Amino acid sequence: MSTKRLYLPSSAPKLTRLSNALQRDLQDSFAFLRQKICLMALIEAVFRRPTTDRVLPFSVIAAETRIPANEVEHLVMKALSLNLIRGTLDQVASTTAISWVQPRVLDKAQIDGLRARLAEWTDKVTGGEFPCGSGARLLLGVSCRGS
């Protein structure tokens, strides 16, 4: 029975050192990277919802971002302080009402979702679901409810 020897290229020790250094860097940055991923998950969760449905319980945010419920308030405060979102926290009710999300680059699916929401909004406006004054009526070129 013969044994085969494995010959490594001369660069193998360098690659091993580089790999170990990268792993250490990732471990050192783990908390920062985790927070950044959670912030992006929060923004995405809010962006996917219509503007009329942006009062989120902490439990929903915890599920969407995959963090413990006791860390949700800190995450939302961090997002507020970085101006990624605007809104209010209700610690007693364990909810947050988000009124604005920082614009960002959208993928095709997000653009399609935005297009659908804009079409829905346009239908509401042109269908007269929103009250408006005579100036708005002239601007929109439609008849408005209550005028």
Image (cartoon, grey):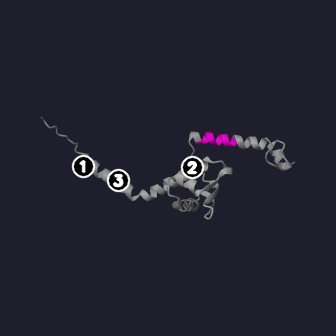
User: Badge 3: how crowded within 10 Å, few (<14), some, or many (20+)?
Assistant: few
Residue for badge 1: 13
Q: Is residue 79 above or below residue 137?
A: below
x, y percent for residue 53? 66, 51
Residue at 62% over, 59% down: 95
Q: Earlier in the sequence, mark 3 or mark 2?
A: 3
Q: Is residue 31 magenta?
A: no
x, y percent for residue 31? 44, 59
Q: Amino acid at mark 2?
A: Glu
x, y percent for residue 78? 54, 61
Can residue 74 be seen here? The reply is yes
Q: What span is colored magenta in the figure? A: 110-118
Location of the N terminus (image quadrant): top left
Residue for badge 2: 44
Task: Please give left or right for residue 132 compared with residue 28 in the image.
Answer: right
Q: Earlier in the sequence, mark 2 or mark 1?
A: 1
Quarter residue 7 falls in: top left
Residue at 70% over, 40% down: 119
The reply to whether the C-beta atoms of the residues labelled 2 and 1 are less than 8 Å apart is no
Pick the front one: 69 or 37? 69
User: Badge 2: how crowded within 10 Å, few (<14), some, or many (20+)?
Assistant: some
Q: Earlier in the sequence, mark 3 or mark 1?
A: 1
Q: Nearer the viewer, mark 2 or mark 1?
A: 2
Q: Secondary structure at mark 1?
A: helix
Q: Secondary structure at mark 3?
A: helix
Picture mark count: 3
Q: Amino acid at mark 1?
A: Pro
Residue at 77% over, 44% down: 125
Q: Is residue 117 magenta?
A: yes
Q: Main secondary structure of the magenta part?
A: helix
Residue for badge 3: 23
Q: Amino acid at mark 3?
A: Gln
